[in-house]
Image: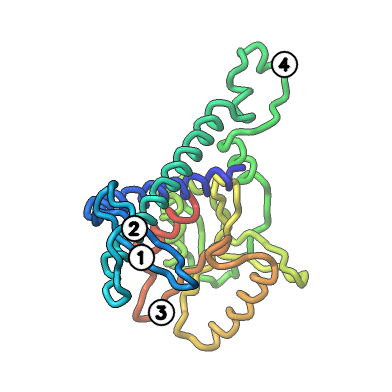
């Protein structure tokens, strides 16, 4: 249901943007009515300049610009009307959902009644807390591994991972570092970050490739990515990828954009 709500809101935004676009286009649309008939298998167009003009002026095939413009206008009007109806229907559905959602029943109970019942749903905050408190065994550091820390004290394996952790911490995005993941072939790997989109209650993994200009390193990681995709993780769906090279460091603006697009 949460994913459906998110998609509905995206669709509503797309429709509202489309409506505004068509309003601008139609403000400069040509006048007149178009009559289109099929005459023995041939399409003939007539432009009517007034309502009293039932037949209209025949449009030659080598001069169809006005006829095409009027036809496009008529089509745009129909699309705009359909977009308005669909947008209104989505707004009404979301309004009803916000007011009458099954999850909201508990919040409408009096405090004494709340103490007597077991909730059918948990809040987003409760869900995130449960997810964060689910124990896991992260990948171990070797004794001689260099030490890098995020601002909040999370030990990671590189400056770029520390930067990523700091960006995640600047948003309400719960994270786990190097949480074990069992692949389709039974192999256990530790993705750089496992992240929770709280609104959708959906898990994402974030893999950062810090030496994308290293052929051997990337050949290994191509196999790792293939295994992840065979295990149900797909770039742009539930897996986020970032890259850097010696001459192209991790772009923080890109990281923020990705977080805002997929994790909020």
User: Upstream in the sequence, badge 1 or badge 2?
Assistant: 2
- Secondary element at image label 2: strand
**Could you classify mark 1 by the number of other residues whose Cα lies within 10 Å: few (under 14), some (14-19), or many (20 or more)?**
many
Position of 72 relative to 219 (above/below): above
Residue at figure coordinates x 34%, y 58% from the top left: 34
Horizontal and vertical percent position of residue 8: 51, 46
**Which of pointers 4 and 1 indicates the residue nearer the eye?**
1
Of pointers 4 and 1, the one earlier in the residue sequence: 1
Mark-to-mark CA distance, 4 and 1: 73 Å
Mark 1–mark 2 contact, CB under 8 Å? yes
- Against 25, is 211 above or below? below
- Comparing labels 2 and 3, the label whose residue is closer to the camera: 2
Q: Answer with mark 4 or mark 2, whichever residue precedes in sequence.
A: 2
Give residue 45's mark: 1
Query: Could you tell me residue 243's position as x and y percent?
Result: 45, 73
Question: For this view, does 203 lie left or right of residue 12?
Answer: right
Residue at left offset 56%, top offset 64%: 239
The answer to which of 139 and 186 lies nearer the viewer is: 186
Which residue is label 2 attached to?
34
In this figure, which residue is indicated by the disc labeled 3? 245
Q: Choose between 249 and 203: the one closer to the eye.
A: 203
Provide the residue designation for mark 4: 116
Marks 4 and 2 close (CB-CB < 8 Å): no
């Amino acid at each position: 249901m949460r994913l459906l709500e998110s998609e509905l809101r995206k669709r509503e935004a797309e429709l509202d943007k489309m409506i505004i676009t068509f309003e601008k286009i139609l403000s400069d649309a040509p006048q007149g009515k178009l009559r289109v008939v099929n005459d023995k298998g041939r399409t003939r167009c007539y432009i009517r300049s007034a309502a009293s003009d039932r037949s209209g002026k025949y449009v030659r095939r080598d001069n169809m610009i006005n006829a095409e413009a009027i036809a496009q206008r008529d089509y745009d009007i129909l699309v705009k009307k359909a977009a308005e109806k669909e947008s209104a229907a989505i707004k009404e559905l979301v309004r009803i959902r916000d007011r009458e959602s099954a999850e909201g029943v508990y919040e409408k109970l009096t405090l004494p009644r709340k103490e007597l019942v077991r909730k059918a749903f948990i809040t987003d905050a409760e869900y995130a807390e449960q997810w964060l408190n689910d124990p896991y065994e992260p990948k171990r550091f070797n004794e001689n591994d260099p030490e890098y820390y995020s601002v909040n004290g999370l030990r990671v394996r590189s400056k770029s991972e520390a930067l990523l952790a700091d960006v995640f911490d600047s948003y309400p995005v719960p994270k786990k570092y190097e949480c074990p993941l069992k692949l389709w072939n039974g192999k256990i790997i530790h993705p750089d970050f496992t992240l929770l989109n709280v609104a959708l209650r959906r898990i994402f993994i974030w893999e950062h490739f810090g030496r994308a200009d290293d052929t051997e390193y990337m050949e290994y990681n191509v196999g790792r990515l293939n295994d992840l995709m065979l295990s149900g993780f797909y770039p742009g769906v539930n897996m986020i990828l970032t890259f850097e090279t010696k001459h192209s460091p991790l772009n923080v603006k890109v990281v923020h954009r990705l977080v805002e697009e997929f994790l909020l």
